[in-house]
Image: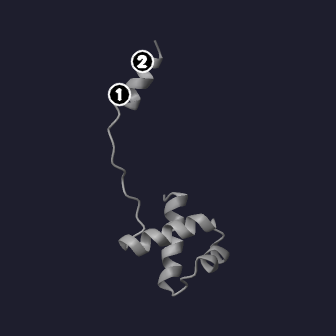
Amino acid sequence: MTSRQETNRQAILQLWNQSIQKTRKIHQCTGISLTTVYNNLTKLCESGTIQHVKGSGRPKKIMANASRALAQF
């Protein structure tokens, strides 16, 4: 099962490959937010892909399951 974001990315990419390359036209065809379409097309033009890239950053000090266990006490 794919997420809504992934479905949106696939729809935008499909329309882009069908030579519909105007942000407003893709927005009108799909009903996806204009900002979302714009951001995804910007990412597509800059990196050649619209796949989600894992962000860099410091990992959490405590894992979610350990946090839940501590919350019980």
Q: Which dot, 2 or 1, sits closer to the camera?
A: 1
Reading the image, the residue beneath label 1 is: 62
Q: Look at the picture and state if 14 lies above or below 66.
A: below
Tell me the SS state at disc 1. Answer: loop
Around disc 2, counting alpha carbons within 10 Å, would you say few (fewer than 14), some (14 to 19), or many (20 or more)? Answer: few
| 71 w.r.t. 8: above or below | above
Q: Which is more toward the observer, 23 or 26?
A: 23
Instruction: Out of 50 and 45, give the one closest to the viewer.
Output: 45
Q: How far apart are marks 2 and 1 (CA)?
A: 10 Å
Q: Residue at x 47, y 70 (%)?
A: 42
Q: What residue type is labelled 2?
A: Leu
Q: Residue at x 66, y 70 (%)?
A: 31
Left or right: 61 in relation to 69: left
Give residue 52's position: percent from left, percent from top. Answer: 41, 59
Q: Residue at x 63, y 77 (%)?
A: 24
Left or right of 30? Residue 7 is left
Q: Where is residue 72 in the image (x, y as percent from the top left)?
A: 47, 16
**Which residue is denoted by mark 2 in the rendering?**
70
Mark 2 touches mark 1? (CB < 8 Å): yes
Q: What element carries label 2?
A: helix
